[in-house]
Amino acid sequence: MIQPLPKPQYRLMYFWHHDDCDVCRQAEPIFDAWVKTLPPMYLNVIKLNATYHQFEKYGWNPKGTPAYMLTINSEPVWKFVGGLGLKQLKQLNKEMEKWQA
């Protein structure tokens, strides 16, 4: 019997920041380092300056930056506001595995 192919997962991480945000300046290189540890094509990333790209346009209204939103197949599955360390982002890897269809 032929098994159906699994539904592809389209993972997209939004990262909002402000130019004048100290926490954002600290969080961005940590975020970039984490992204480089992921397999190729595992996660698509969009970085947005919150001064020019308003959150509401993306269906969310956090109360600060940096802000992160992960979507899988266009559905938000995880949101966070504030700086994240590499250890916390690596924990997110484990969470992403749980969200696979």
Image (spheres, grey):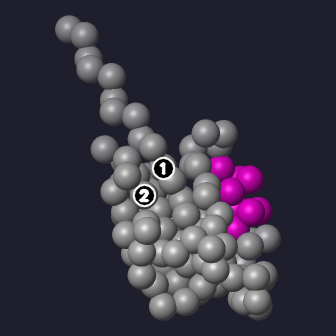
Tag shown at residue 100: none
Residue drawn at (62%, 74%) of the image: 52
Q: Which residues are magenta?
A: 31-38
Residue at position x 37%, y 52% in the image: 74
Q: Quadrant of the C terminus?
A: top left
Q: Magenta includes 56?
A: no
Residue 78, given in percent of the width and then of the height, sits at: 41, 69
Magenta stretch: includes residue 37: yes
Relative to 1, is 100 above or below? below
Mark 2 element type:
strand
Magenta region, main secondary structure:
helix
Location of mark 1 (residue)? 11
Q: Residue 79 placed where, x, y %? A: 44, 74
Give percent across and percent down for residue 36: 74, 53
Q: Is residue 89 left or right of residue 58?
A: right
Residue occupying the far left of the picture: 1
The answer to which image quadrant residue 35 occupies is bottom right
In the displayed structure, 41 sits above or below 29; it is: above
Disc 2 residue crowd, few under 14, some 14–19, many 20+, Cα 10 Å: some
- Residue under label 2: 71
On the question of residue 84 being in view, the answer is no
Q: Is residue 50 visible?
A: yes
Residue 22, image x, y percentages: 76, 91
Q: Residue at x 60, y 85 (%)?
A: 65
Left or right of residue 23, residue 72 in this image: left
**Mark pair 2, 1: CA separation:** 6 Å
